[in-house]
Image: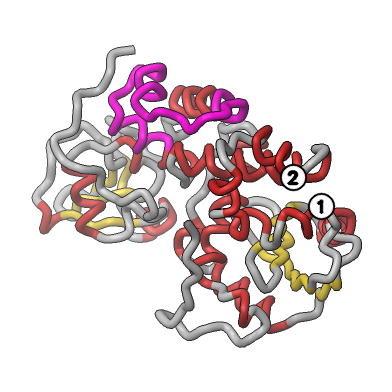
Amino acid sequence: MRAAPAPTRPPAAADGDLCAYESDEQRWRAVRERDDAADGRFYYAVTTTGIYNRPSCAARLARRENVEFHASLEELHTRGYRPCRRCQPGEPEPNRLQAAIVARTCLLMNTAVAPPNLDDLAQSAGYSRFHFHRMFKSLTGLTPHAYWTAVRAQRVREELIRARTVSDAIYQSGFTTTGQFYAVSSSILGMTPQEYRAGGAGLEIHSAMGATDADPVLVAMTATGVCAVLEGPEHAARARLAELFPYAVRRADDRGFEARLAHALAHPAAGHPVDALLPRDVRRVCRHERIRRLLCIHLDPASASGPAPAPGKETALHVS
């Protein structure tokens, strides 16, 4: 596969932005550049022809004043637009090959003990650094480094349960020093590693169910941070939470926390679908990491049981 040409501009969105096509300006830039990473995220219609297209369509570029952007095919059909015969929007998205490449990359990172080198990942996939980064993020909602960070966090949670010592768990998970781990331990565990190994003894944990683009999730949080994101029916998720933290005080009737969780999950970034062509375990890692990151933005653990903030008034928990 021939590598795409190197970009002449920086990526459209910063690494922390999960909504790369949120504004009309960003959407128009994607259309001008035939950005295939935007396919499926939105469609554009040309008012003078009555035809709608994918962002990557190779058709002649229309004048900006004649272009509308729409989030769904239903909107376009309601307004009477016809699909472009060239790019065939509405047909299955052309992501199968890209999903296979991303899935293979995720499999490599699932076992990697060192941070991934973006240039090496891109070269292995046959893409430029910029195009690979954009493709990976469009399918997963995360950057490659954020995905690897999530995998390492999952690994350390598993190792803390079975490893002989905390230090063994830290090093076996891919952290090079204990200081490196403790700098991010609160965002990974929501408690100290000793408390995690002790089943949450002496801690109070608030939990609530939330809706995602796939299965429902149970989110649990201490005064320090998120300690668990568990998928599945409520009874099964709560049973798993009890297995993880049998000695904690678990509170499941906190309406304030439930409202704040719903407020966080209503953020537009929560609606970014993880591509259905990716393996289930990859989709799960991506969903859980995005939920954790959204909660770090929208929930202040010290006031987790308080009322949901008004729009634009979210408190921020800064995570290293």
Crowd class of label 1 (few under 14; some 14 to 19; many from 20; radius 10 Å): some
Q: Nearer the viewer, residue 241 or 268?
A: 241
Label 1 vs 2, first from the N-terminus: 2
Which residue in the protein does label 2 denote?
166
Magenta stretch containing residue 156, yes or no? no
Q: Nearer the viewer, residue 281 or 84?
A: 281
Residue 222 lies, in percent from the top left, at: 70, 70
Q: Amino acid at mark 2?
A: Val
The image shows residue 153, relative to residue 270, as above or below, that is above
Crowd class of label 2 (few under 14; some 14 to 19; many from 20; radius 10 Å): some
| Residue 216 in view of the camera | no
Residue 61 left/right relative to 314: left
Q: Residue at x 60, y 45 (%)?
A: 178
Q: Amino acid at mark 1?
A: Arg
Which residue in the protein does label 1 denote?
197
Magenta stretch containing residue 126, yes or no? yes
CB atoms of marks 1 and 2 within 8 Å: yes
Q: What is the magenta range? A: 107-136
Q: Residue at x 81, y 52 (%)?
A: 197
Secondary structure category for the residue under label 2: helix
Q: Residue at x 63, y 66 (%)?
A: 225
Q: Nearer the viewer, mark 1 or mark 2?
A: 2
Label 1 to label 2: alpha-carbon separation: 8 Å
Residue 308 lies, in percent from the top left, at: 57, 83
Residue 140 left/right relative to 312: right
Residue 307 left/right relative to 160: left
User: What is the quadrant of the N terminus in the image?
Assistant: top left
